Image (tube, grey):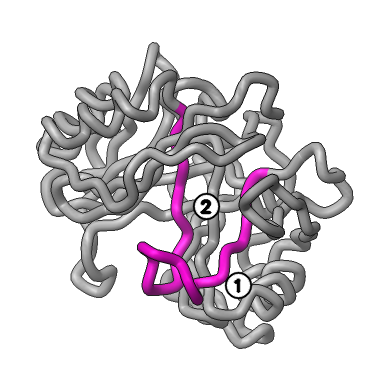
Amino acid sequence: MLTTRYVTGAPNWIDVATSDLDGAASFYGGLFGWRFRPAGPGAGGYGFFERDGRIVAGGTRPAPEQGPPSWTVYFQSHDAAAAAEASERARGGVLVRPTDVRDQGTAAVLTDRGGARFGLWQPGRLGGLGVAGETGALCWVELYTADVAAAAAYYRAVLGLETSAVRFPGAGTYTCVNPAGEGEESMFGGVVPLAGDPVETDAHWLPYFAVDDADAAVARAGRLGGAVRMAATDIEGVGRLARLADPYGARFAVLRPSPGTA
């Protein structure tokens, strides 16, 4: 699971680009107890979702070239410019070149060789999210891709990520991801083949948020105008999870981890 001990290659930020920030604030506030705080003048409408006074995500309105509302997962980089160049060498793309965000850090948005969009965050004064791995916060990420091996090679070249095969009872082999040199105990996500998946049809990163009760979260999401993309399901050794979308189409998942899940 994720923690705020951010190292190179680990997810350290997440934001949602949505056509209705007020509506998104209402939805995620009702679902997770988040409150939206505008970042202030000069931030271009960007703001922060907070839970108990700690930042859990960012929020903004999408630029025309960004496409439909969606979540973007950002990974820590000590050199965003070098990582962007590595993406191009590895047959990925660069949607937004590394850009300084005042003195807070440097951001970039890339696409991997399969077309999945993700971000880089090179910390300045802002190191990353204020909370992770707890109820109401980001706890896991998954990459859905047409070619697991090619994706693993790309993220190794760009972010130094390492992969390992983990077998879950009744769920087959799952490809887990961890930062370089940090070992399997630092796993923060997985890589999932699109072929045969009952829900996902395109390459993308899917964020998971921890909840105390997955079924209650699904019911709340429905009452708040969200959509259930995959009903709550038990995965032995993992927990109970469901895939959802907010009222504007941004995809995410919720997870009630099994007791003792690290």
User: Percent from the top left, x then y, of residue 88?
Assistant: 61, 83
Q: Is 145 displayed left or right of 91 in the figure?
A: left
Residue at the location (39% across, 74% down)?
A: 202
* Location of residue 151 by image quarter: bottom right
| Relative side of 188 to 27, left or right | right
* Callout 2 amino acid: Tyr
* Picture residue at 41% right of the left edge, 24% below the top: 136
Q: Is 232 rendered above or below residue 230?
A: above
Asked whether residue 183 appears in the rendered view, the answer is: yes
Q: Up-down: is 238 above or below 120?
A: above
Amino acid found under the numbered disc labelled 1: Ala
Look at 76% across and 39% down and name the residue there: 186
205 or 129, nearer to the observer: 205
**SS of the residue at dot 1?**
helix
Q: Earlier in the sequence, mark 1 or mark 2?
A: 2
The span picked out in magenta is 188-210
Quarter that holds the N terminus: top right
Q: Which mark is residue 84?
A: 1
Q: Where is residue 31 in the image (x, y as percent from the top left)?
A: 26, 27
- Residue 24 highlighted magenta (yes or no): no
Could you say where residue 11 lies in the image, as x and y percent from the top left?
59, 46
Q: Is residue 125 visible?
A: no
Q: Is the residue marked by circle 2 packed among few (<14), some (14-19), or many (20+) residues within 10 Å?
A: many
Which label was assigned to residue 74? Answer: 2
